[in-house]
Image (tube, rainbow, N blue to C red):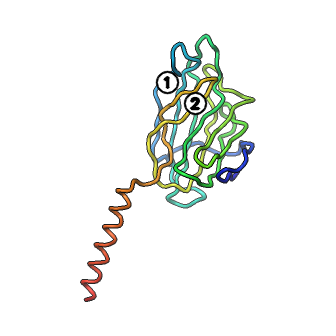
Amino acid sequence: MLLTPGGPAGAMPASLGSGPGGGSVVFYSSAPTPDTPPPGNFTAQLDSAVTKGNTFGGNALTFWYRIMNVDQTPNGAAIFSLGVPLPGSASVYLDQLSGSGNLSGLAMNTGGSISFYWTTNPVMENQISAWQSIETPFSNWVLKSVGVIAGTSEDVAALIPAVPEPSTYAGIFALGLAGFAAYRRLRG
């Protein structure tokens, strides 16, 4: 389903045929991360992966997320939300892998982040969610924090979309200028 920046929430489909397989650009699994302060409500572990090529083009990246509720404390909190930041507003395509793990029932694009919700099917202790995917027009990624919520929230490391740093644009511009100067010398 296509969610536009600031658009309404939508029901998540359960139609994705496969998870992030051999086409992965990179795969990252976070360390088990307890929420703070102690004793906390949950310990989450997040698998994230990036694959290249999607409906936005051959260099566009798809980001994959799967959350595990590794250990519940005596407070017994179930994980019911995952928030992934986006670098600015973008239209994205969301899907999830059916038949494996807890399916999220709802997703929301707020123009600066994507939130997945397991409100009717929370991820309980020793459970794992289905793979959630975000097809993006972005062609860069970075390792940063995403938000996991289970009554309280905690930041967990994951691969997220990124735009090139300004220094990258400066380097590309400098190369273009050098190429143009060489072209002018050859023609002159």
Q: How many marks?
A: 2
For the point 63% across and 26% down, which residue is it?
79
Above or below for 30 versus 63: above
* Farthest bottom residue in view: 188
Decide: is 97 above or below 187.
above
Give the x, y percent position of residue 184: 28, 83
Which secondary structure lies at badge 1? strand
Give the image location of residue 154, x and y in percent: 54, 27
Q: Secondary structure at mark 2?
A: strand
Discs 1, 2 touching: Cβ within 8 Å: yes
Amino acid type assigned to the residue bearing label 2 in the image: Val
27 relative to 69, above or below: below
Few, some or many residues within 10 Å of mark 1 (<14, 14–19, 20+): some
Front residue of 121 and 146? 146
Q: Which of disc 2 and disc 1 is earlier in sequence? A: 1
Residue 167 against residue 178 in the figure, above or below: above
Q: CA distance from mark 1 to mark 2?
A: 10 Å
Q: Position of residue 142 (x, y in %)?
A: 44, 44
- Which residue is found at the position 34% from the left and 71% from the top? 176
Identify the residue at image location x=66%, y=34%.
100
Instruction: Tell me residue 145's x, y (percent).
Output: 49, 36
Query: Can you tell which mark lies on residue 33?
Result: 1
Q: Where's the C terminus, which quadrant?
A: bottom left
Left or right side of 141 for 148: right
Report the amino acid beneath label 1.
Answer: Thr
Residue 99's disc number: none
Q: Any mark on residue 148, and which?
A: 2
